[in-house]
Amino acid sequence: MKRLLAAPALALLLALAPAAWAASFHGTVTHVTDGDTLWVRPDHGGAPVPLRLAGLDAPEICQAFGPQAAQALRARVLRQPVTVRTRGSDDFGRQLARVQHRREDLGRWLVRHGFAWSAGFQGRTGPYTREQALARAERRGLWAAPAPLEPRRFRRRFGSCHS
């Protein structure tokens, strides 16, 4: 009998697991590290939370167009209120998040203006594929260069800017 009850309980726990690592909060951007990393101080108090924007990959800070991507993000949201929806964390202890600023998805804005790539995973296209195609067609931002190097390939070839 206990085994029969355990299976539905386990299924319920697995179904609720994403909610356990997802959280939403409102806060203010206190720091921008690069084109896809920022720190947000929650409105409810506490230390600023390091966030890695989910669904995109911006050029490394030491890579061509990296400083421009960081500056664009800084100019857009530094000291601005945002809404954050976290989705787990990365290997560097940053929360993976979707961030909204003035009701606009910040990742969508970055990719659409040519400051980042839509990041696919395991053969799937990224969430901002359409925005990337538009930015590329219009030669916006990093797409103005003849052959921009994806950050993932840059890191494989040259390593991290922070090593």
Image (tube, grey):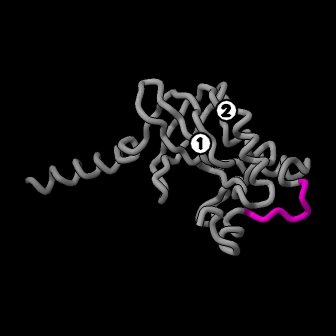
Q: Nearer the viewer, residue 31 or 117?
A: 31
Is 36 placed left or right of 6 in the picture?
right
Q: Are marks 2 and 1 in contact (CB under 8 Å)?
A: yes
Q: CA distance from mark 2 to mark 1?
A: 9 Å
Residue 30, image quadrant: top right
Instruction: Name the mark on residue 38.
Output: 1
Magenta stretch: dominant SS? loop
Range of the magenta residues? 144-150
Mark 2 surroundings within 10 Å by alpha-carbon count, few (fewer than 14), some (14 through 19), many (20 or more): many
Residue indicated by mark 2 = 77
Where in the figure is residue 7, as x and y percent of width and height?
21, 54
User: Quick one: SS at disc 2?
Assistant: helix
Where in the figure is residue 14, as x and y percent of width and height?
32, 51
Task: Point out the image quarter for the C terminus.
Answer: bottom right
Taking 79 as reference, is 8 above or below it? below
Task: State whether residue 98 appears in this view.
Answer: yes
Residue 119, image quadrant: bottom right
Residue at 23% across, 49% down: 8
Q: Which residue ends up furthest to the left in the rendered image?
A: 1
Q: Nearer the viewer, residue 20 or 71?
A: 71
Residue at 75% across, 54% down: 66
Where in the figure is residue 105, as x and y percent of width and height?
66, 35
Q: Amino acid at mark 2?
A: Val
> Was residue 147 drawn as part of the magenta stretch in this picture?
yes
- Total numbered circles: 2
Is 2 placed left or right of 109 in the picture?
left
> Was residue 94 drawn as part of the magenta stretch in this picture?
no
Task: State whether residue 130 appears in this view.
Answer: no
Q: Which residue ends up furthest to the front in the rendered image?
A: 163
Residue at 64% across, 71% down: 159
Q: Amino acid at mark 1?
A: Leu
Taking 125 as reference, is 9 above or below it? above
